[in-house]
Amino acid sequence: MLQFQTLAAYGMEDLVANAILYGLLASGAFWVFWVAYKKKFQSRRIQQKRKHPSASIRIEIKNSIVALLIFTAIDVLIYSIQMKGYTQIYTDINKYGWLYLGFSVVLMILLHDTWFYFTHRLMHHPKLYKAVHKVHHLSTDPSPFAALSMHPFEVLIDAGVFVVFAFLFPVHIVALWIWQLTHLTLNVIGHLGYEIYPKGFNSHWLFKFKAPTTHHNMHHEKSNGNYGFYFTWWDRIFNTEFKNYNQVFNAIHERKAKAENGAHLFI
């Protein structure tokens, strides 16, 4: 009975924390770009003609709530196993040190990017797409709330990498939090609908392999390419990156520059 109460309390705290974090990130991004300053950022809008009615936003929010409940259930399951000492999650930083903690965060990002690319491509198999992944692609012009708008089965697949991390190698609980925060933040940015990465980002020798917002937005608009999440290299290796990706990214910044120059003429 005591263990059930402990797990129930943990689950409630986990759900509230995740809901607050996701709510702040998604609603904050939505308010800034889609409501308060949408005219100011219009030149940054990737799909200039909005194709996202209010009904779609309500569906995204509803699906996100279901996703948060599923993520919480998985967190509770992992926590219950951790309490019995069967995972490799640890809390004593001195056990492996700060350097390893930083390394483990980078490792999780790289592994998750690989997991995402291949499971994402799998989701585009005609049968899985129709039965599962189509839910996410109802947002052809995604808002920040589309980040977690998925079919429950896809939520389980997406969360599967967390289960892998808990057993595959030693990982500090703080490292898991950092990875989850990074994942959620980039997920919201990827579904923002506005390009916030700077001009030249896609061609810079260091940053060109990081996927900006345009990269994933094009996937929602066209569906059959740009499957990567954090990075673009898997798309480049398997030739699944849209051929006009760089042109679209550059065109947004050209449009932004023209809008800013036009505004200066009236100052």
Image (spheres, rainbow, N blue to C red):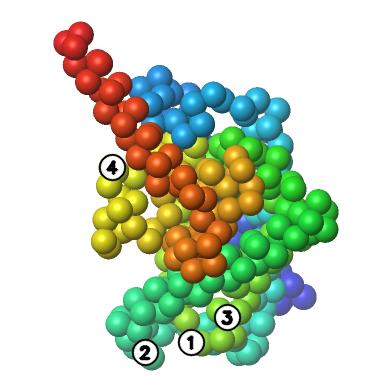
Question: Disc 1, disc 4: CB below 8 Å?
Answer: no
Viewer-nearest residue: 124 or 93: 124
Q: Quadrant of the C terminus?
A: top left
Q: Earlier in the sequence, mark 1 or mark 4?
A: 1
The dot on residue 199 is: 4
Residue at 74 percent across and 48 percent down: it is: 134
Q: Which residue is mark 1?
A: 170
Q: Earlier in the sequence, mark 4 or mark 3?
A: 3
Taking the image as shown, residue 80 lies to the left or right of residue 208, namely right
Type of the residue with mark 3 = Ala
The dot on residue 166 is: 3
Question: Disc 1, disc 2: CB below 8 Å?
Answer: yes
Q: Where is 103 relative to 239, above or below?
A: below
Q: Quadrant of the N terminus?
A: bottom right
Residue at 55 percent across and 79 percent down: it is: 165
Q: Secondary structure at mark 4?
A: loop
The dot on residue 96 is: 2
Q: Position of residue 64 (x, y in %)?
A: 66, 47
**Of circles 4 and 2, which is in front?**
4
Q: Is residue 256 visible?
A: yes
Q: Residues within 10 Å of mark 2 (few under 14, many from 20)?
A: few
Type of the residue with mark 4 = Lys
Q: Where is 93 relative to 265, above or below?
A: below
Q: Residues within 10 Å of mark 1 (few under 14, many from 20)?
A: some
